[in-house]
Image (spheres, grey):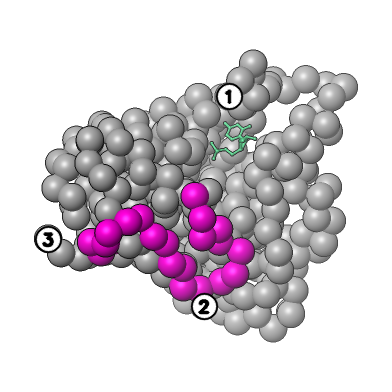
Amino acid sequence: MTVTTVRVPAKVNLQLGVGPVRDDGYHDLVNVFHAVSLFDEVTATPAATLTITVEGPAGVPVGPDNLAVRAARLLASHAGVEPRVALHIRKDIPVAGGMAGGSADAAAALVACDALWGTGMSRETLLELGARIGSDVPFALLGGTAVGLGRGERLTPVEAVGEFHWVFGYADGGLSTPAVYAECDRLRADAPAAWPVVSDDLMAALKTGDPLALGRALTNDLQPAALSLRPSLAAALAVGVESGAVGSLVSGSGPTCAFLASSASHAAALGRTLSGTGRFSAVRQARGPVPGAVLI
Ligand code: C5P
């Protein structure tokens, strides 16, 4: 194979239950991931050395910190090959937006380089290498809907009926994930976090495919922290509710706002209304669940 391209989805968290901070600085989570149809593409081309180029919004690191670069290096060293690849990322997932765009690119780079170099890694190995790059990388490989425990990397797929229709409101400027977790700890300093458990209401909503029930069951323990760091998000979420969204929450660590619609046509109408408010730098429709990183 001379060139490989992998398409990889963004995620929204249907439940983000954040437990107490651990000794290693991470938090134990109940993280119900849901892959949605906003995609990045990573292309891997043979090259003398490892290089990276990015097409799309500003703010993506183009050095050794880029998660796709780290993933390619990790795979090469694990497989005992030289990381000879030119990576090119076409970004559509917002940068530092709480939709795991960087993790998605790492997952895509693992799949693209494994195919390019013929290293033939098992699914389990790719998941394990992905978890070393970041907590959300294994889910970007898996896709669909899944419960993630531990840091979020211990995944169990969830059977979801049908399709859900979303509208995402992007914000100008990202939020740093470590900063949002730190703010969550600060806000909870006087009342330590309870151990999170998977929401029965959420699992029931996913089994029936009822968007109204899903909308009622959406929760995000990082939302107060994201709102504390970015107070304008409160009004942005309220606008979604006033515009008829059946559920609204901050996506992951934010600042992207996720709005659930009751149907595809409702999502189209909601998207037009939200665009017209001028509160978001961009408004995008997406459906979920969709598969994880795939060669195209
Ligand atoms: O794993 P990843 O590098 O993507 O995590 C980014 C940051 O998010 C971590 O450095 C940590 O501050 C926070 N985090 C956490 N608990 C988790 C996952 C992430 O505190 N389970």
Residue 133 or residue 139, whichever sits in front: 133
Give the quarter the ligand 1 occupies: top right
Give, as a three-letter code, the residue at label 2.
Ala
Q: Which residue is mark 1?
A: 28
Residues shaded magenta:
44-64
Residue at disc 1, secondary structure: strand
Point out the image quarter for the N terminus: bottom left
SS assignment at label 3: loop
Check residue 97 in the rendering and tell me which mark sits there, or answer none.
none
In magenta segment, residue 249:
no
Identify the disc placed on residue 1.
3
The residue at 28%/33% (across/down) is 78
Q: Earlier in the sequence, mark 2 or mark 3?
A: 3
**What is the secondary structure assignment of the residue under circle 2?**
helix
- The residue to which callout 2 is attached is 268
* Residue 7 x %, y %: 32, 62
Amino acid type shown at disc 1: Asp
Whether the residue under disc 1 has CB within 8 Å of ligand 1? yes
Magenta stretch holds residue 52? yes
Residue located 51% across and 60% down the image: 62
20 on left or right of 212: right
- Image position of 188 (left or right of 145): right
